[in-house]
Amino acid sequence: MYSHFLDLDTHHGRHIFVWPVPYQGTVSFMGGTKSGPEAILKASYQIETFDPQLGVDLADMAHFATLPPVHCPASGPHELHAAMRTVLANHDPGKDFFVTLGGEHSIALPLFEFYQKAHPDLVILQIDAHSDLRTTYEHTPLSHACIMARARDLGLPAIQVGIRSLCREEYEYITAQPDHELMTVFAWDLDTPEKTARAVNTFLAGRPVYLSFDIDGLDPSLVPGTGTPEPGGIDYAWMREFFAHLWPGSPLVGMDMCEVAPIPGSVVSESVAVKAIVRILTCFLNSQSETT
Amino acid sequence: MYSHFLDLDTHHGRHIFVWPVPYQGTVSFMGGTKSGPEAILKASYQIETFDPQLGVDLADMAHFATLPPVHCPASGPHELHAAMRTVLANHDPGKDFFVTLGGEHSIALPLFEFYQKAHPDLVILQIDAHSDLRTTYEHTPLSHACIMARARDLGLPAIQVGIRSLCREEYEYITAQPDHELMTVFAWDLDTPEKTARAVNTFLAGRPVYLSFDIDGLDPSLVPGTGTPEPGGIDYAWMREFFAHLWPGSPLVGMDMCEVAPIPGSVVSESVAVKAIVRILTCFLNSQSETT
Amino acid sequence: MYSHFLDLDTHHGRHIFVWPVPYQGTVSFMGGTKSGPEAILKASYQIETFDPQLGVDLADMAHFATLPPVHCPASGPHELHAAMRTVLANHDPGKDFFVTLGGEHSIALPLFEFYQKAHPDLVILQIDAHSDLRTTYEHTPLSHACIMARARDLGLPAIQVGIRSLCREEYEYITAQPDHELMTVFAWDLDTPEKTARAVNTFLAGRPVYLSFDIDGLDPSLVPGTGTPEPGGIDYAWMREFFAHLWPGSPLVGMDMCEVAPIPGSVVSESVAVKAIVRILTCFLNSQSETT
Amino acid sequence: MYSHFLDLDTHHGRHIFVWPVPYQGTVSFMGGTKSGPEAILKASYQIETFDPQLGVDLADMAHFATLPPVHCPASGPHELHAAMRTVLANHDPGKDFFVTLGGEHSIALPLFEFYQKAHPDLVILQIDAHSDLRTTYEHTPLSHACIMARARDLGLPAIQVGIRSLCREEYEYITAQPDHELMTVFAWDLDTPEKTARAVNTFLAGRPVYLSFDIDGLDPSLVPGTGTPEPGGIDYAWMREFFAHLWPGSPLVGMDMCEVAPIPGSVVSESVAVKAIVRILTCFLNSQSETT
Amino acid sequence: MYSHFLDLDTHHGRHIFVWPVPYQGTVSFMGGTKSGPEAILKASYQIETFDPQLGVDLADMAHFATLPPVHCPASGPHELHAAMRTVLANHDPGKDFFVTLGGEHSIALPLFEFYQKAHPDLVILQIDAHSDLRTTYEHTPLSHACIMARARDLGLPAIQVGIRSLCREEYEYITAQPDHELMTVFAWDLDTPEKTARAVNTFLAGRPVYLSFDIDGLDPSLVPGTGTPEPGGIDYAWMREFFAHLWPGSPLVGMDMCEVAPIPGSVVSESVAVKAIVRILTCFLNSQSETT
Amino acid sequence: MYSHFLDLDTHHGRHIFVWPVPYQGTVSFMGGTKSGPEAILKASYQIETFDPQLGVDLADMAHFATLPPVHCPASGPHELHAAMRTVLANHDPGKDFFVTLGGEHSIALPLFEFYQKAHPDLVILQIDAHSDLRTTYEHTPLSHACIMARARDLGLPAIQVGIRSLCREEYEYITAQPDHELMTVFAWDLDTPEKTARAVNTFLAGRPVYLSFDIDGLDPSLVPGTGTPEPGGIDYAWMREFFAHLWPGSPLVGMDMCEVAPIPGSVVSESVAVKAIVRILTCFLNSQSETT
Ligand SMILES: [Mn+2]
Ligand SMILES: [Mn+2]
Ligand SMILES: [Mn+2]
Ligand SMILES: [Mn+2]
Ligand SMILES: [Mn+2]
Ligand SMILES: [Mn+2]
Ligand SMILES: [Mn+2]
Ligand SMILES: [Mn+2]
Ligand SMILES: [Mn+2]
Ligand SMILES: [Mn+2]
Ligand SMILES: [Mn+2]
Ligand SMILES: [Mn+2]
């Protein structure tokens, strides 16, 4: 009953695919990410598309086609990625804008590959509490805890924002990497939204950017519904302003919203996820129409 | 078992009616407002009436008579308002101070009318995430999403604080209204509590004020139990200081606390609602005793 | 994401409309019926359509078109019924088979009227814990507690099965009515499924029948997720056999499944509702194909 | 807001005290009994007082005075019992009928003593899954697991029905006691309601009886909300008929309903508790009016 | 904190390994099986080991060594089975009795293989709502829905009790198999416990038996906490008596308890799982000591 | 299954005892503290021991022995304290470092006494929302609401941080006490972490310090799972920095973490509790190794 993101009936502006990938193969602690896409779609029916701060309406700048959810195989992440690649094979990475709804963060890998095909100079902007740079985790290199290690394997530069939990090996890897290849902005080092946006833009340097948004990058006081909540995270108002200052700059080619694990009886976590997606798309598309 | 607000056994100071209106006719998304009044009363048993910041005790300044809850008819908001007006007909709007416990925000309309009778220059101070200025919503002009449009129909000036969600029509209405009739303070434009209190007092200009407090004005990290949570809201400490600075100034004639929808297993939302009521009454009554 | 009842991709057999009516205007005690249709659709994805007892598959006998949910107005039951009548106006009561998913039991009235148009000799078969024969309840004659009184107003004969809760006025009304107009089978008087099916068939007398299934007719040990649970109800196995023996006999023209109010964290109640619908349709359609 | 049992406004028939004792000092496993009395009172607002099987209305035979809940001390069961005895000291055990709402089963001891004062030949009828005959449990002789051992210390004969969980020491105690002093009817030995009622009446022998009803005597499929659920328990319909056949016989002098521990999001357990109380009082009072 | 099954401190009788396998790789609908083993261990602390019906105490007949839980890899069921086989390689299938706590039903395969090594004439006794005979499900032959097809691949004869949900392909497979290879006892064909035990014993014919107990074989009114609840299941009292009559007969070499998916706020499901394990072991070991 | 704090397998550095005391005798409002220790242990399995801000790993500085939980007697706090003293009698207060996991705040008293024996100049550092200075509460001087009054009875100086709820009597007591005996830092008076750490260190004056951490000192937006949530509390980032600045200074001899009452379906509260413990130990032990 909640199959259309934002429940819009418009045909203006940018065409955007919303793609549910309810994958929970490599469950941590609290689980529930398989219910994430559905909860996000449902919550999207309650969210206004008008942005009173910017005075613009996302419904005037974009329309959405919500794809059928990927049927996630039980045989493990290899097969999940294969199923995703089959769908993506019918799309054009140079034109098609996906908002992929996780599911675990491990769902991002086929999208990294997809956009890299059309954009060899692609950069990943990761919002996360965790650096996700482990070589392998729970016996698989395709765990959510390894997703950025896999991005690095593809040769993708990455900037990660809001990080506050990692192991010593990840820490040493970060330290060893050159800053223009991998830049980690710890949560305690976050500056004002405006200055951080400027620093990120310096790293991005106008190259096409894919945004991989692990909801646990935000503070768990606002998003309790996630697998491994980490206090001391990004505040909603900070994020709202950060994206207002990020553009114009690097063009956004696609994004995901991962690790939403709804808590029965509460709708806060998924509502915040929708608000974040709407704000990001509004800021980006608004900056494009302004520059045009 | 929890029939008396704050469980006090005192008879000092101002007489205050606490009035449960467990109305949930026009449910949004998450629902549960019909359990709001009961949860607030129950939570009130755990709240200290002593205010260590101000060094005064609400139990010395007021005593409370908790009325029986309105039996909310199933036939719709028209009948609910009729039932409320029947109760209010036995009260004196010039003397009787009501703390009405919602239920949905739509319960405020009979109270606007009630206090307007005795105070033709009444002003509404609204704390809310939503501007509630739609002409009609879900086929009725009496929805919670229209309550401030109905206040405007009555000719009441209003100042709304914490707003961060509305549609284009509401935005245009706000823009078109003269500032002395309707003033909207967006969440991202909030100044320090002290300066905001001063600005609000300028608007109120000493006229009698009715406070309509939609709990979703506060940030959902603290109040997850509400129908349509909107991140980026008012912080508890900000609110605590705001009311400390609001008085002396416009006399408070009545107030409501709406849209509390308790989450099973958690008591945070209703506890915050009680703390807010206690703080507001303490600040107001304390300012009165000081000025006497 | 769960928009199609049973998630079938077949086009055999009887065409059946599945119609979500998530109405919760006249909430009792526990509420939650507005989430009923969605929960039922979601649970339907897990239910096998093959019936190993009868050796037939519902997917061979019927295909389903799931309609968009009725947008339930907040202004009360009158407007809800108007909205439902608008949808029904585009359908043929002589041909179209609806499985309506409540929502409260009050949603059944427009369907009673709809089928009565094509079938002047229509009979209502009600499964329920409550007789629902009050003249008015909570200030409206359109409450769920009055739905069978409204059926009687339309002149419809009715047989009610599983009843175990009513007030003295309803009891006296039942006693006063002639047995061929209204027959109440109390829960403690239930015979074997076979004998009860025979008694019901005697009452129905081959006339077209509309089945109004209030889920609280079943025992709350199996269906805790309903507004006013009443112990001592119908056992699932009893119901399974009852419908196996009801046909051939009176042709079923439509049915509803009401008062499912999902409990967060549990899926039992809605799963049982789906199993009941599937069993009823399988028994009826199988009896038709056998008799053909 | 739910302070009156059954929400009646009548003054006919027997005067009955309803006494909430929300004691949870000696919590087992799941806890929550401190919320039992409130949940029972709240659920009572939804229960019909008319009994369609017997054709009588409890509201014609009794009226209820709901006492303020005992303020349960944190210092342990000794102090709780002292607080209860203080209240009972103002009552007449020869005349006053209490329906005490637990809280844990340990709350029954002061009531055993109270009624024994006026009725030296008092007998206890216990409905329970556990024999509660331990000498001491968790370092206190006043645990819920010892309540019947304390009854035996007072010299009270007891018959226990529905028992299915005990330790070897309790088993040997039961075996060693003479049958006219202590009779244990195991759940697997339950006969039809009628025959069991007859056997119980033989034990009671017309002596005054106090009913101590531990809700876990019923099957946990219907009452999941209790501290130590034990499958294989008493069915609701069995219980309904058992009490219909128990009277006339031994006069009931008081009763308790213990160990209700409400589950958030579900109301089944407390609804069943209310139905049981209502059925028991209806059967007893109806038998009295018939014999008069 | 709940690491020892039943919290016993005894060393009598049969040595039994309790092995937690919290695997949830191939999640259905409701999920939660990864929390099953922990919930079962925790619930076991509340269960009496004395059996008042048989007059014996499990603590006199067995002692338990609870193994560390298998660390379930995220890479899929192949790796899970490999991890389990590594543990089992250190054990003797001819001597070691495992009570394996799932986790999904797919965890049973390595145990089938393990016991088959020592017992070439091993038979599987399956309690389940589902026949689990699909060739493949959700892209893997190792799904919980295929576990009995894998048992058949190993050449193991099997008798399944309580079945009530399957697809046409499974139905046709069952029909095609010779009765001495695969026997399916549907839920609606269950006879008395005694007669069913006799029929099962005829099938088992004294051969060593492994019991694979999918908790959804029991009725969901008592076990709501499972992934795919199916009404019309086995009653607890029936099961209690069935195992009392099953022995002496085929020796039990090991067992599992699968698909327990605890519901937050309720402990009924896991308590019933523990009671079932305790009853089964008590009946089997008691029959052995009697026959010795 | 979660019996070892942090699930470490190391033997470096300081030996630390982790001691679960699941005591909930004097339950307030929401209860659930008896599940606190288990939830903390379980959550600890998900927390990284590496601290990327300090660049050190707790696993290099400490190893943990998790003691069996205290079996909490039902007879009241006196007996609980006796049971705790029995365990502590086997330990050396001059050497043994306990991290005690509550349970209610009342569990701290035996630890105050224990450490005072070896450190006559012991000071208590309390993080709390409540001053806990009542003489008696709910009929016992051993309530959680009295724990600091008991500390004062022992002659222990105390500094309390984050306080925002107390009654007039506590307020007057605080005012009457000399500042070097009792210092209360209200939540609204908190300075920067660095300055507050300096002020606290002035009070501590190098004397040995026991940290009694009532989790409700933190803001309930992050820790909703506690008995009496009080908004306006300490922010996680503030706390993280505060402890970074507290040492070197007074040596920490032991600590507790109390009043964690897990909310079913959410893991945020206990995760924050673990993060706090890990941060505190890391900051303290790191300061020691640096100064060595
Ligand atoms: Mn993350
Ligand atoms: Mn991530
Ligand atoms: Mn609002
Ligand atoms: Mn509002
Ligand atoms: Mn009903
Ligand atoms: Mn009905
Ligand atoms: Mn019991
Ligand atoms: Mn008992
Ligand atoms: Mn199964
Ligand atoms: Mn199975
Ligand atoms: Mn506190
Ligand atoms: Mn405290």
Image (spheres, coloured by chain):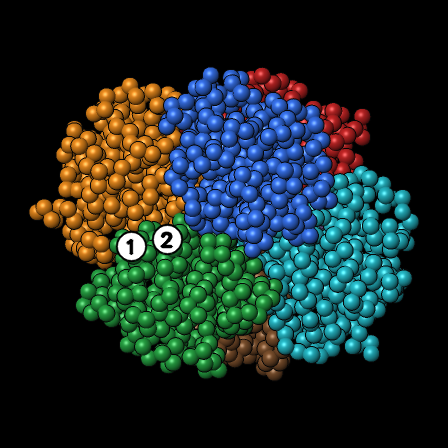
Chain colours: A green, B blue, C cyan, D red, E brown, F orange
Would you name the residue on which mark 1 appears?
A190
> In the drawing, does residue B184 fall left or right of residue F11?
right
Instruction: Identify the secondary structure beneath mark 2.
Output: helix
Distance from mark 1 CB to nearest ligand 1 atom below 8 Å: no
Indicate the quadrant containing the C terminus of chain D: top left, top right, bottom left or bottom right. Answer: top right
Given the image, what chain letter belongs to the residue carrying mark 1? A
Q: Residue placed at 38% from the left, 55% from the top? A: A241
> Is residue D205 or residue E190 the one in the foreground?
E190
Q: How far apart are labels 2 and 1 at the CA level?
A: 10 Å
Determine the residue positioned at 34% across, 20% down: F172
Locate the N terminus of chain D by quadrant.
Answer: top right
Nearest the eye: C193 or F253:
F253
Q: Residue at x 26, y 28 (%)?
A: F183
| Numbered tag placed on residue D101 in the rendering | none
- Amino acid carrying mark 2 in the image: Trp
Q: Secondary structure at mark 1?
A: loop
Q: Position of residue F214 (x, y in %)?
A: 33, 38
The label on residue A238 is 2
Mark 1 belongs to which amino acid? Answer: Leu
Q: Is residue A33 visible?
A: no
